[in-house]
Amino acid sequence: MNPQKRREIFERFRAANPHPKTELVYRTPFELLVSVVLSAQATDKSVNLATEKLFPVANTPGKILEMGEEKLTGYIKTIGLFRTKAKNVIGLSKIILEAYGGEVPRTREQLESLPGVGRKTANVVLNTAFGQPTMAVDTHIFRVANRTGLGPGKDPLEVEQKLLKFTPPEFLMHAHHWLILHGRYTCVARTPKCPECMIKDLCGFKNKTKVPPPSGG
């Protein structure tokens, strides 16, 4: 994809949604970190339903540890893999309290050392909580980057590196959110909504869906 076309794509995203935000509901970096850990293989909606009950009771590493794993499990049992996630949230709370004075660390290496935190989760926290221009490649962004030609790659790391390299710097801060929202609501997995896509004339996807013909006589 040539630089002019890439720039036009991001200009359209920016015009339609100048200040994109995560759909996870949070108020502090720690709440965001917990929410992102809980969101693995789960929807943001299901996480928000759980955390709207959890966070008023426990939203700091200390309060999470006081609550304990068994009680925490009760709050998040509607989310997939809840037992593993409860163990991870307890574990990361303990490390944040003991090693970082209760504050969420601000480097990828430190974040990735926490239980349940991989590269994608670390990138979300760095971008959304701390304003760093990172690219958290989930299934949506991986699909959009490959379909459109914005950053084709065989695995998430390659896609991340290409998007960071080729996205114009002025768009990098919000690119992650634009791409994830585009993949979640327009460039969906099974039947992408190409007829209503704002970048369909710029997209490199060869198997674009067509507007179905009108039914009836």
Image (cartoon, rainbow, N blue to C red):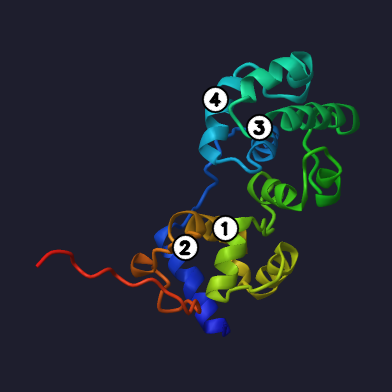
Q: Residue at x 22, y 70 (%)?
A: 213
Of labels 4 and 2, the one closer to you = 2
Say what secondary structure mark 1 lies in.
Answer: helix
x and y, in percent, of residue 17 in the image:
44, 57
Q: Which residue is mark 2?
A: 187
Report if residue 68 is visible in the image.
Answer: yes
**Which label is found at residue 52?**
4
Classify mark 1: residues with Cα within 10 Å, few (<14), some (14-19) or many (20+): some
**Which label is found at residue 140?**
1
Q: Which residue is mark 3?
A: 31
Classify mark 4: residues with Cα within 10 Å, few (<14), some (14-19) or many (20+): few
Do labels 4 and 3 touch, CB within 8 Å?
A: no
Pick out the residue farthest to the right: 99
Of labels 3 and 2, the one closer to you = 2
User: Which residue occupies the foreground of this view, 143 or 216?
Assistant: 216
x and y, in percent, of residue 96 in the image:
83, 32
Earlier in the chain: of badge 4 and badge 3, it is 3
Do labels 1 and 2 touch, CB within 8 Å?
A: yes
Classify mark 3: residues with Cα within 10 Å, few (<14), some (14-19) or many (20+): many
Say what secondary structure mark 4 lies in.
Answer: helix
Q: CA distance from mark 1 to mark 2?
A: 8 Å
The amino acid at mark 1 is His
Q: CA distance from mark 3 to mark 2?
A: 29 Å
Of labels 4 and 1, the one closer to you = 1
Q: Residue at x 55, y 41 (%)?
A: 43
Q: CA distance from mark 4 to mark 2?
A: 29 Å
The amino acid at mark 4 is Glu
